[in-house]
Image (tube, rainbow, N blue to C red):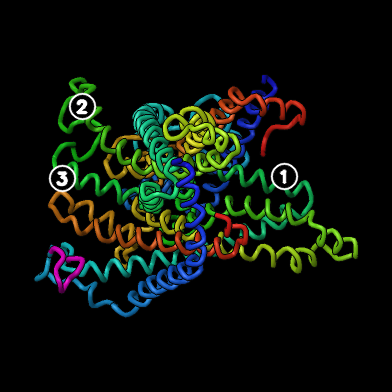
Amino acid sequence: MNSVKTLSLSCRNPNRRRLNRRQRTLVVVALAAAYLLLLLGGGLLLGEEGLSTNLTRRNMPPSLSYPLGTDWLGRDMLARTVQGLSLSFAVGLAAAGTSAFIALVLGLTSALGGKRLDTVITWLVDLFLAVPHLVLIILIAFVFGGGITGVIAGVTFTHWPALTRLLRAEVLQLRSAEFVLVSRRLGRSRWWVATRHLLPHLKPQFLVGLILLFPHAILHEAAVTFLGFGLSPHRPAIGVILSESMHYLSAGSWWLAFFPGLALLTMVRAFDVLGDNLRLLFNPRSAQE
Amino acid sequence: MWLFLAGKFLRLLTLLVAVCVFSFLLLEFSPIDPVRAYVGADMLKVGPEQWAKIAEYWGLDRPLPERFMRWSAAVLRGDLGVSMIFRRPVLEVIGERSLASLALMLTAWTFSGVFGFALGALAGMKQGTWTDRVIKWYCLTLASTPLFWLALLMLLTFAVWLGWFPVGLGVPAGVPAHEVTFADRLRHLLLPALTLSIAGVAGVALHTRQKLVEVLQSDYVLFARARGESGLQLFRRHGWRNIALPVTTLQFASFSELFGGSVLAEQVFSYPGLGQAAVQAGLRGDVPLLLGVVIFSALFVFSGNLAAELLYRLIDPRLRLKSACCKQGGYL
């Protein structure tokens, strides 16, 4: 009896949900994009004014004029947070873009470049996955001499293995598809096949992979700056803000840590939701879910 | 089975060699001057002759291959060099620190496994309901929460406001080492471990839920439902038997994230573990210690993956058969 009821319920629900999914996705995409644009634009608009020290308004809890409060030097936390997030955004963009590009090149060569090359690349992927992600980032950031370059290099050179694996598997599957085999028989070169047949098929995977790299890259960037790599007091990244706030926690300044972290969380979540929804849109099979 | 183990051992060897060579080369080409890192703030007091002496003492004036051979020979003898920060052998530092870290990670690993499995199972059994939606939303949000922020919140709530736990460190401050009791250590361990567990729940729970949903869509569950089974009985007879293995495997394979998480948690709670040592080494240019931590963490991750694969082969006979007739392990 019970299972019959749930069955009929679960039959009705998907119909209603499927109608909404596209619209919902579009709304989510618009919201996420608006939020991210707001962050970027805000970083430019708010400028230096909120960042200047003003000792008459030190350590103020959140109020109407300072929604996120002020810090121990009287700087507006809203301005600092937005600036920090736009910096994280930029680093994330650079890191995720480069990582995705590396993954695309390696994934294609691995699947098209013959057996030996494939072994080398899969081995390289395994090697990079063998060491914990954060430790590897610390190592690479250290090698590049710390600072903001070190952080970007660390985050960039550690995010490609997972996507490489995914793209390689995809190419391996595509390679034995009939249209590719026919094209090869007709005398097309490997390069032609790769650029004309495989790349268009990889585009959605690549795009979604790129967007889903963002949250990882941003979180890792924040984590590494929090640990103290790439510390630059003039351009406070979100990790630096949080790490500085640690000294004022026992004095009860909870807003210094709470809101910047929450803002970072919403930004990461926005990217996550964006990527997942785009994947649902691109993948025809997901209509079954 | 022995062939499998031998293959794994060979793989571990190649992996370790590769990690060593790779890290060594990376550090070699970095712009950081080891002598400068060693001298640090005393830069002005050290003349060029002394500078050259220090370089010569460490053999830094020799060619690269020779230095690598000497270093790797020392590593093979179990000598990872002397840490510049702690002025003690790296192996000793790692041995001491890793005990603290392993205690932390093991606690968190167990907690997150149990709670994650319970939450995921609940969500999977109630698929499509509000319970499921709330749990899913919670886990997805948790997955994009910066761990160090979560740790800060925990610290703020439980240590600063409520005052239930100490604000940090592995042992009480100002108490001689021999007077530190086990209860003290436990009190200092609990908050970081709790943070790590809460963060670790997300992955396990989502994975459990997905596997359980797959199982519940199978024909045998449909048949069981037709026989009148439902709820807890269905879960006990068909659910958990089928999902326990993949979920345990995933939990073992998550050692890499666990290590990363413990680095951050240790930093926030000033917990004297391996992660904190790694951060210090990276920030202050302690190359031997950094290399040691990299090698140790690679070993740690490898043992997690190996445990996962062994568990699978021990419990699921199909895998043994498959690899026996195809004569290949490795990927798949």
Question: Which numbered tag is attached to residue B184?
Answer: 2
Please tell me whether mark 1 sits on a helix, a strand or a loop: helix
Of the residues under marks 3 and 2, which one precedes in the sequence?
A: 3
Q: Which residues are magenta?
A: A61-69
Label 2 marks a residue whose chain is B
Please tell me whether mark 2 sits on a helix, a strand or a loop: helix
Regarding residue B142, the answer to whether it shows in the image is no
| Image marks 2 and 1: residues in contact by CB distance under 8 Å | no
Regarding residue B175, the answer to whether it shows in the image is yes
Residue A238 place in picture, x, y as percent:
33, 61
Q: B172 or A204, which lies in front? A: A204
Residue type at numbered disc 1: Thr
Question: Which numbered tag is attached to residue A235?
Answer: none
- Give how far apart the Cα atoms at labels 3 and 1 are: 53 Å
**In the displayed structure, does residue B115 sit left or right of residue A274?**
left
Q: Which residue is mark 3?
A: B160
Q: B162 or B52, which lies in front? A: B162
Q: Is residue A66 magenta?
A: yes
Residue located 21% across and 73% down the image: A52
Q: Which residue is mark 1?
A: A119
Residue B179 place in picture, x, y as percent:
18, 21
Label 3 marks a residue whose chain is B
Name which quarter of the figure residue A205 lies in.
bottom right
